[in-house]
Image (spheres, rainbow, N blue to C red):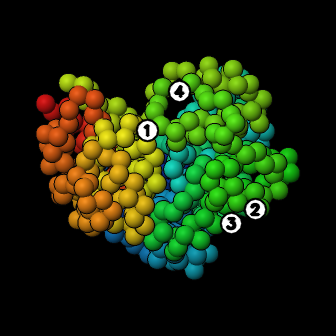
């Protein structure tokens, strides 16, 4: 146990949201090991959550799965919620009415992190994970650096490894930033990548989504740094919401970094990381050395198979239209066979359809929104080659029939995955398996 963190002995703590992929595992374990009486509750079924439950085997944790009980929230000493749970969730309302404090894992980490730690936060609609990874590698050339947050893995378990003077780099989602607003916290260095629109149903509109993102700079001090993208109007506008010193980054007039990952958007991510690293004393030469071997994160422009001169690229992370267009532009025009579609997030896909109609060798549509996307692409370019495939398996089969040496089969859908998959990771893994099945 980390002696610097307080004991939770005898405290009744309810963890809201375990998740099929274990989002609540880290905080439940951390609290239980510190003496808390932990109840984990999730509306999903025990069968679906069996793998996550198994990872907490042996700990004195009570599970309430398949639904919630008001008493777990009204009688608790503390409620820890998943960031993906809306603040207006009925069970959180029960806790508030009973005067029970509500927190989340990232807040517990921030509260118990050593006071002399330099905290770096990265957010944006797209590019934040890659930027976080690149920045972590750059900073490691000069500083003891810890990387986590929305990128994956519980930072609570790593508290004992963080020493005075260390740097902590955190990817921060809009969900996290919305919940953290009451803490009035912003990082010492805030990096904002491209900001567009996403999660509009959760936040209640694009303005509220952007406002949640602004929390990353809203509470900064004059000695802090805000690193913003001059090529993205929304990102650049965050300068008006911060007291920090503003550093703008972009591609114009700046020498490119040497990267092993394709795409203009990834070069922009690297420039964001370089600008932030510079704020923390890392020279360009050191930064370049740190990222020399970086080949990308899973599901982000990841080459998963090459055969017969055909390259298969998994960019399943592309869940908004702008990301799908950026991925397409990473390859020669006319050589991309792109798979698009999925569940409908109510985003404007018209520009994406126009771009892909002119640039793709073929567009293969899948999912709930597939038929509508196909119609929009045909309307933009009647000569465009569009196949309505329905699901990923048929789309991959069609791609294999169409592809010739020199072509790229690109899974970059521009939409969410929830109609046919649990998340974008599962979709990307399915694509990789199908791509490798000759």
In the rendered structure, are the residues bearing label 1 and label 3 in contact, judged by CB atoms less than 8 Å apart?
Answer: no
Instruction: Measure the alpha-carbon separation of dots 1 and 2.
Output: 33 Å
On screen, residue 111 above or below 76: above
Q: Earlier in the sequence, mark 4 or mark 3?
A: 3
Q: Secondary structure at mark 4?
A: loop
Spatial CA span between label 2 and label 3: 17 Å
Secondary structure of the residue carrying numbered label 3: helix
Which residue is tagged 1?
Answer: 330
Where is the N terminus found, in terms of image quarters?
Answer: top right
Q: Which quadrant of the figure contains the C terminus?
A: top left
| Coordinates of residue 191 in the picture (x, y in percent) | 66, 46
Q: Name which quarter of the figure residue 114 lies in.
A: top right
The residue at the point 57 percent across, 80 percent down is 97
Observer-nearest residue: 118 or 248? 248
Q: Secondary structure at mark 2?
A: helix
392 vs 68: above or below: above
The secondary element bearing badge 1 is classed as loop
Query: In front here: 36 or 25?
Result: 25
Which residue appears at 64% of the width and 66% of the height?
211
Mark 3, residues whose alpha carbon is within 10 Å: few (<14), some, or many (≥20)?
Answer: few
CA gap between label 1 and label 3 equals 40 Å
Residue 64 figure quarter? bottom left
Q: From the image, tell me which residue sits under label 2.
A: 241
* Real-space Cα separation, disc 4 to disc 2, in angstroms: 32 Å
Q: Which mark is residue 259?
A: 4
Which of the two discs, 4 and 2, labels the residue nearer the N terminus?
2
Q: Is residue 123 visible?
A: no
Are discs 4 and 1 less than 8 Å apart at CB? no
Mark 1, other Cα within 10 Å: few <14 / some 14–19 / many ≥20: some
């Amino acid at each position: 146990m980390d002696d610097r963190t307080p004991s939770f002995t005898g405290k009744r703590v309810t963890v809201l949201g375990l998740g099929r992929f274990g989002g609540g595992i880290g905080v439940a374990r951390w609290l239980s090991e510190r003496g808390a009486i932990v109840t984990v509750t999730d509306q999903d079924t025990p069968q679906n959550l069996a793998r996550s439950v198994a990872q907490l085997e042996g700990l004195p944790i009570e599970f309430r799965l398949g639904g919630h009980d008001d008493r777990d929230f009204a009688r608790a000493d503390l409620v820890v919620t998943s960031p993906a749970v809306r603040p207006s969730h009925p069970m959180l309302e029960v806790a508030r009415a009973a005067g029970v404090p509500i927190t989340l894992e990232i807040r517990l980490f921030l509260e118990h992190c050593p006071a002399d730690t330099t905290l770096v936060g990265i957010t944006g609609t797209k590019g934040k994970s890659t930027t976080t990874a690149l920045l972590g590698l750059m900073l490691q050339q000069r500083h003891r650096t810890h990387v986590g947050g929305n990128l994956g893995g519980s930072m609570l378990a790593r508290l004992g490894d963080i020493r005075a003077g260390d740097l902590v780099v955190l990817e921060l989602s809009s969900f996290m930033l919305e919940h953290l607003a009451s803490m009035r916290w912003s990082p010492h260095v805030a990096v904002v990548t491209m900001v567009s629109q996403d999660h509009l149903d959760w936040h209640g509109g694009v303005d509220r989504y952007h406002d949640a993102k602004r929390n990353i700079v809203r509470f900064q001090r004059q000695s802090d740094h805000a690193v913003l993208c001059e090529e993205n109007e929304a990102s650049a506008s965050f300068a008006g919401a911060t007291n920090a010193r503003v550093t703008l980054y972009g591609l114009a007039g700046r020498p490119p970094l040497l990267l092993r990952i394709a795409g203009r958007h990834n070069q922009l991510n690297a420039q964001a990381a370089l600008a932030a690293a510079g704020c923390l004393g890392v020279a360009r030469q050191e930064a370049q050395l740190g990222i020399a071997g970086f080949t990308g994160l899973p599901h982000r422009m990841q080459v998963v198979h090459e055969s017969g001169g055909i390259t298969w690229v998994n960019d399943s992370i592309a869940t908004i239209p702008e990301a799908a267009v950026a991925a397409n532009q990473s390859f020669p025009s006319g050589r991309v066979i792109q798979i698009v579609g999925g569940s409908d997030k109510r985003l404007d896909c018209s520009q994406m359809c126009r771009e892909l109609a002119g640039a793709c060798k073929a567009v293969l549509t899948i999912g709930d929104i597939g038929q509508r996307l196909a119609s929009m692409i045909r309307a933009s370019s009647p000569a465009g080659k569009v196949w309505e495939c329905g699901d990923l398996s048929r789309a991959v089969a069609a791609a294999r029939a169409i592809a010739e040496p020199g072509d790229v089969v690109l899974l970059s859908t521009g939409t969410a995955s929830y109609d046919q998959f649990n998340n974008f990771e599962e979709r990307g893994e399915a694509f990789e398996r199908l791509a490798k099945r000759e």
